Image: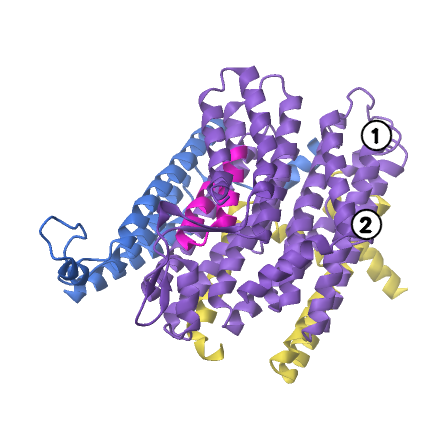
Chain colours: A blue, B purple, C yellow
């Protein structure tokens, strides 16, 4: 049963590493954003793994449960609450990034980061 | 009354939501935004110091081991939070005032972003819970991206997307670090974590603890705009509207000090922590000023200078003694005010001349004397000329590094100040003193009076803090003594 | 004369930095100030290593001084590295992250 927690931790590490690789090295902006989503979900999965308890019960106190038995056998509820907030944050940053990509795609006609997000400091120096 | 403490976050947040929902009614929105902006600096000054436990959950005490546990999210309000929240509230008031008088029809979503940023930064400063701070840090990042994207400057969307992408790599890394701390101590309350670390319940040389330090430190580098994120931070300062940039830099400084104070309370027993902060701060100081010296676009120049000055703050905090921490926090307060003055001033020049290249400007002293004098005094304050506030905080920093046994750092700080002075003298000469080029058209547009009023208010604060620094430094020193 | 020619070549290289556009005295003096400031401050920061070991500090300072002074002018190369493009910024961010992680995770004994 302890292998379950180890498997979750390894999966979250794999998600973070794959996400970092694609956010840094891949040129397509949509794939970069998918990679960023991977990194965030990997971090969330890691926090969920912290609350794991081998042989534990869901941390909801049902009527008729003995509180001291519940306290020793329930999984740790704090990480689950934190992860809910974190998932919402990930969704909103994803929405903002995709909205910006939509506007920029209409302007440039390409999804390549080399073209879209290139250096802008030289162009504007003498044009203004 | 301790009920005012959560109101410092709730008032700008509710105002932001109401303004963005009812922005159709232009006049009502303007009046409402103005009233809320006036209240923002008043609430922290009127409130008493104390703690606020959300949900009313008082700290629990374990009778056997006499250890305190904090089950609720705690807001702690002391002198330090009071001056910084009042400072950011005053700045928000001035920026909202400039925005409301500049445009006939105001944009509800833009005011929403300004107030949301203020609420996020206030919450980050007040909170004692590291995950709560992370949530508001993400909200702040979204507000910053919105403020940059909303400006009418070329390439602002690209800059906003770059900032968002870099931020979405930096923030989950910080979340991973917070996760490691949660795994080690089982709590996200900073007081509990610090107590666990100092009482020896956590092995401070374990790789997990060091890993969490590294990850949260990297997230802090992104939040504060220290290298390697100095180019993107100065980029967003140069692409936002000038009054927006004035507020953005205050958000950066306050998020920097709130995160570093939390890290200090947890990791101060590790010497590697202070070494890392001092290393990156020195790098920021050197890079910021070197790049500012070679710029011809004065928006970018101020952006790089603002990033370089953050190095001074980090230096004070990295040295670790009570005097050094006081100096660093006082420098942060001065930074917020001086950089805001410079952004608003240079924004007034852009407004009046529609030109950002210093090579094409000249002779502005005859047309805009008030703005030029206030900009000159602001620039001298940033460089550390007495009797202005920048001098007091930089003198304290130099003395602190000397008393810690690092004379090289003092010499470096003095050199950076001299280089900042060179930047300002060069820019002031190029823009105001030398003869006007023939193809420059001036005299058509006037500088808005709201901007001159805002600059005047900030200038008065700079001069007052320079002559009477003890008003602020005694209180900060007491706060620092409490966390050491 | 040779030294004068060398300095003149350095100034000509600075000219390329500011093109297209006029190069004024103020800009060139700013760049030369930045050059000198960069070299002196980096060498001075290297002296700080004396708290770790004096021999290391002496070696690093000397090598750094020689490398920096022989590569004058530094500012044009410097400015290219500090551009706005996303790739450069991501590259430096990832290099810093890897250095921090490696240093902290495996350098735990040095803490």
Does the CB distance between marks 2 and 1 fall below 8 Å? no
- Please give the chain letter of the residue carrying mark 2: C
Image coordinates of residue C94 in percent, x first then y, are: 47, 57
C-alpha span from label 2 to label 1: 27 Å
Q: Is residue B406 above or below residue B104?
A: below
Residue C81 percent across, percent down from the top left: 61, 53
Q: Main secondary structure of the magenta part?
A: helix
Which disc number belongs to residue C28? 2
**Label 1: chain letter:** B
The residue shown at (85%, 36%) is B432
Judging depth in this view, the residue of B61 and B82 nearest the camera is B61
**Residue C20, relative to residue B75: is it above or below?**
above
Tell me, yes or no, whether the highlighted magenta stretch contains residue B123.
yes
Q: State which region is magenta.
A: B114-139
x, y percent for residue A84: 30, 45
Q: Nearer the viewer, mark 2 or mark 1?
A: 1
B379 horizontally vs B131: left or right: right
Reading the image, the residue beneath label 1 is B368
In the image: residue B249, left or right of residue A47: right
Which residue lies at the image location 49% right of the left edge and 16% below the top edge? B24
């Amino acid at each position: 049963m302890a292998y379950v927690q180890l498997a979750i931790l390894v999966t979250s590490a794999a998600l973070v590493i794959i996400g970092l690789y694609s956010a840094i090295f891949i040129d397509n902006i949509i794939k970069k954003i998918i990679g960023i989503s991977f990194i965030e979900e990997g971090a969330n999965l890691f926090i969920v793994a912290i609350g794991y308890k081998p042989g534990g019960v869901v941390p909801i106190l049902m009527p008729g449960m003995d509180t001291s038995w519940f306290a020793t056998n329930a999984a740790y509820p704090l990480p689950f609450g934190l992860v809910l907030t974190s998932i919402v944050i990930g969704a909103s940053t994803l929405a903002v990034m995709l909205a910006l990509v939509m506007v920029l795609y209409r302007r440039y006609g390409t999804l390549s980061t080399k073209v879209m997000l290139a250096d802008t400091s030289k162009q504007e120096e003498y044009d203004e | 009354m301790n009920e005012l403490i959560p109101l410092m976050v709730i008032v700008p947040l509710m105002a932001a939501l109401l303004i963005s929902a009812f922005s159709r009614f232009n006049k009502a929105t303007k009046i409402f935004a103005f009233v809320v902006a006036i209240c923002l600096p008043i609430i922290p000054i009127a409130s008493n110091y104390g703690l606020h436990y959300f949900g009313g959950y008082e700290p629990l005490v374990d009778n056997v081991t006499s250890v305190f546990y904090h089950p609720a999210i705690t807001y702690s309000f002391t002198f330090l939070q009071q001056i910084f929240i009042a400072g950011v509230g005053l700045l928000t008031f001035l920026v909202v005032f400039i925005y409301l008088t500049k445009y006939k029809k105001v944009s509800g979503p833009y005011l929403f972003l300004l107030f949301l940023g203020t609420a996020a930064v206030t919450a980050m400063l007040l909170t004692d819970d590291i995950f709560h701070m992370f949530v508001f840090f993400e909200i702040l990042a979204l507000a910053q991206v919105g403020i940059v994207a909303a400006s009418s400057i070329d390439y602002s969307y690209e800059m906003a997307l770059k900032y968002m992408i870099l931020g979405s790599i930096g923030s989950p890394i910080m979340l991973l670090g917070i996760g490691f701390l949660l795994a080690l101590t089982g709590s996200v309350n900073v007081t509990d974590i610090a107590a666990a670390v100092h009482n020896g319940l956590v092995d401070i040389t374990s790789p997990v603890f060091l890993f969490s330090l590294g990850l949260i430190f990297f997230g802090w580098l992104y939040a504060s705009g220290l290298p390697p994120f100095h180019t993107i931070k100065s980029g967003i300062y140069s692409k936002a509207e000038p009054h927006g940039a004035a507020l953005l830099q205050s958000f950066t400084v306050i998020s920097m000090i709130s995160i570093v104070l939390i890290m200090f309370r947890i990791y101060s027993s590790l010497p590697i922590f202070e070494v890392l902060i001092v290393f990156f701060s020195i790098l920021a100081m050197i890079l910021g000023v070197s790049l500012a010296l070679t710029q011809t676009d004065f928006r970018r120049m101020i952006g790089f200078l603002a990033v370089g000055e953050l190095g001074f703050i980090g230096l004070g905090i990295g040295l670790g003694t009570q005097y050094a921490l006081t100096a660093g926090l006082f420098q942060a307060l001065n930074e917020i005010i001086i950089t805001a003055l410079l952004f608003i001033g240079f924004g007034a020049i852009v407004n009046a001349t529609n030109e950002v290249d210093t090579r094409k400007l000249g002779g502005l002293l005859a047309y805009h004397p008030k703005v030029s004098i206030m900009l000159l005094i602001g620039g001298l304050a940033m460089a550390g000329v007495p009797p202005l506030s920048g001098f007091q905080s930089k003198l304290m920093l130099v003395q602190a590094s000397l008393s810690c046994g690092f004379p090289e750092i003092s010499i470096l700080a003095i050199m950076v100040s001299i280089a900042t002075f060179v930047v300002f003298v060069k820019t002031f000469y190029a823009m105001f003193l030398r003869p006007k080029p023939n193809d420059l058209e001036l005299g058509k547009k006037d500088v808005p009076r709201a901007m001159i009023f805002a600059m005047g208010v900030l200038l008065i604060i700079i001069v007052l803090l320079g002559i009477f620094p003890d008003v602020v430094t005694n209180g900060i020193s007491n706060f620092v003594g409490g966390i050491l | 004369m040779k030294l004068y020619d060398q300095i003149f070549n350095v100034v000509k290289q600075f000219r390329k930095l500011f093109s297209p556009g006029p190069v004024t005295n103020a800009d060139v003096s700013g760049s030369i100030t930045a050059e000198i400031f960069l070299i002196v401050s980096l060498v001075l920061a290297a002296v700080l290593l004396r708290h770790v070991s004096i021999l290391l500090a002496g070696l690093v300072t000397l090598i750094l001084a020689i490398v920096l002074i022989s590569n004058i002018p530094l500012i044009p190369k410097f400015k290219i590295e500090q551009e706005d493009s996303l790739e450069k910024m991501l590259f430096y961010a990832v290099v810093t992250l890897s250095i921090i992680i490696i240093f902290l995770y495996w350098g735990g004994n040095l803490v």
